Image (cartoon, rainbow, N blue to C red):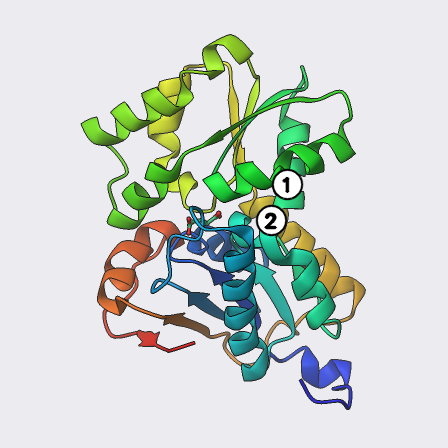
Amino acid sequence: MSDSPVPAARLSERPIGVFDSGVGGLTVLRALRAELPAESFIYLGDTARLPYGTKSGHTVARYALQAADELVEGGIKCLVVACNTASAAALPALQQRYAEIPVIGVIEPGARAACAASRSGRIAVLATESTVRGGAYTQAIARLRPDARVTAIACAVFVALAEEGWTDGAVVEAAASRYLAPLRAAGPDALVLGCTHFPVLGQAIAAAVGPGLRIVDSAATTAAAVRQELATRDLLRSVGGDTPVVELLATDGIERFAAVGGRFLGAPIAPGTVELIDL
Ligand code: DGL
């Protein structure tokens, strides 16, 4: 970013940058578009290096900084890290690097949604191996609710199933039932989908855990946090201005991104509208 600060009025016209390892963050983009219909967005899915969730925190942080650099250099007014794994590994580093703009992750909002949904304080977290290993959710929930008892389960195969567009059927049911077996003993009353790829598997997960357990994700609470932050900094785009634009970028497999991504975004993505970039 340049050294001279951009006036708030001009900065507010810029798009919001959103980044994930693949199509999963489109579940967050969907909530952001619903919450902030006047805003433009530029979304980057780092599909060439997906999955992040099985890699070390150090590697994920390096990838996250490269992806974020690409968005920030393009001129954005706010960065949303729509990936739990990247939020867990790199949020403080990203916030330090781009101190001029708000940088918002999905873990804190997800933890808030989980605490609000739970009465008993027994909370299950489904996430990637890297997110579970780093303990980011357990720590974020403990800050909000020190008496909480968290059961975190790493569900790596869910990412592959979601990217493949397999959201129901025997394979998904078998994976869900195997991953969620430990929850029978833990008896949580709330479950947070701590990976932005998982909301599309929500029905299979709900069927595997049975009734009486509230399933939440971080999309809506993240979108509310972004609105709040932009409003506080006077960075909301004025309603009635230029038509908002949504730009989609991916580092590999743009045809597949368009074909599968619509399910995550909640709206079809026309083939040919995803731009291939290199980081
Ligand atoms: N969507 C990412 C998350 O929220 C993880 C997917 C991956 O493993 O790359 O954690």
x and y, in percent, of residue 216 in the image? 53, 33
x, y percent for residue 49: 37, 61
Locate the N terminus by quadrant: bottom right
Does the beta carbon of the residue at mark 2 sit less than 8 Å from ligand 1?
Answer: yes
Could you tell whether 67 is left or right of 80 in the image? left
Which residue is label 1 attached to?
136
**Mark with earlier residue (2, 1):** 2
Q: Position of residue 72 (x, y in %)?
A: 59, 77
**Can you tell which quarter of the image residue 157 is in?**
top left
Compared with 66, 61 (above or below) is above
Question: What element does badge 1 sit on?
Answer: helix
Badges 2 and 1: C-beta atoms under 8 Å apart? yes
Does residue 219 sit above or below 150 in this rendering?
below
Does mark 1's beta carbon lie closer than 8 Å to ligand 1? no
Residue 245 versus residue 133: which sits nearer the camera?
133
Residue 128 in view here: no
The residue most toward the left is 170
**Relative to the observer, which residue lies in front, 263 or 135?**
135
Say if residue 16 shows up in the picture.
Answer: yes
Q: Amino acid at mark 2?
A: Ala
Q: Label 2: few (<14), some or many (≥20) within 10 Å?
A: many
Q: Where, by quadrant of the figure, is residue 139 drawn?
A: top right
